[in-house]
Image (cartoon, rainbow, N blue to C red):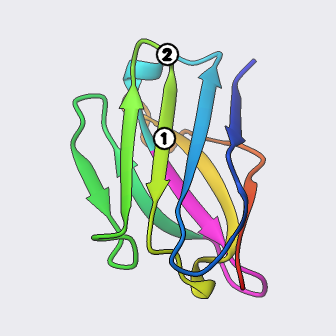
Amino acid sequence: QVQLVESGGGLVQPGGSLRLSCAASGISFRLHVMGWYRQAPGKQREFVVSITSGHSINYADSAKGRFQISRDNDKNTVYLQMSSLKPEDTAVYYCNAQSVLVDTLHYWGRGTQVTVSS
């Protein structure tokens, strides 16, 4: 059974930082591109950033310079370090695992809420 479990969300003031984690189980972690997506109220889910097993990274423009993704292939965990947070970063953040063997195969976590507010 595949599980992606996010943690680390919460309430933070503008300009603050948060670190999200996503622990994966039930998949061959190294055979998946790991990513983060987010969905703000009333908006569609959008891509934030992804990282391959070889640590190649792809950022959405909204994340460049403020967010950093990393992964630990031994711990089957991917991280998202977010800094200089803005109110518009408020969203539910979802962990995603995309198979490199079948690129249409995606797994999703349940999400973790990030709220940026003073």
Q: Quadrant of residue 1?
A: top right
- Residue at the location (44% across, 66% down)? 83
Q: Is residue 102 left or right of residue 107?
A: left
Write down the residue under mark 1. 79
Q: Residue at x 48, y 49 (%)?
A: 80
Looking at the picture, does residue 37 appear above or below residue 91? above
Determine whether the residue tagged by mark 1 lies in a helix, strand or loop. strand
Rendered image: mark on residue 11? none
Q: Quadrant of the C terminus?
A: bottom right
In the drawing, what numbered circle is on residue 75?
Answer: 2
Relative horizontal placement of residue 85, taking residue 44 as reference (left or right): left
Measure how far apart labels 2 and 1 are at the Cα level. Answer: 11 Å
Q: Where is residue 115 shown, x and y percent of the image?
A: 73, 72
User: Could you say which quadrant of the image residue 86 lies in?
Assistant: bottom right
Percent across and percent down for residue 94 are 65, 54
Considering the numbered disc 2 on the image, is that residue within a helix, a strand or a loop? loop
Contact? badges 2 and 1 (CB < 8 Å): no
Question: Is 48 in front, or is 105?
Answer: 48
Amino acid found under the numbered disc labelled 1: Tyr
The 10 Å Cα crowd at callout 2, few under 14, some 14 to 19, many 20 or more, is few
Q: Residue at x 54, y 70 (%)?
A: 16
Q: Is residue 82 above or below residue 5?
A: below
Specify the segment rendered in magenta.
Answer: 35-45
Give the side of residue 90 with respect to residue 48, left or right: right
Give the residue furthest to the top: 74
Count of labels in the image? 2
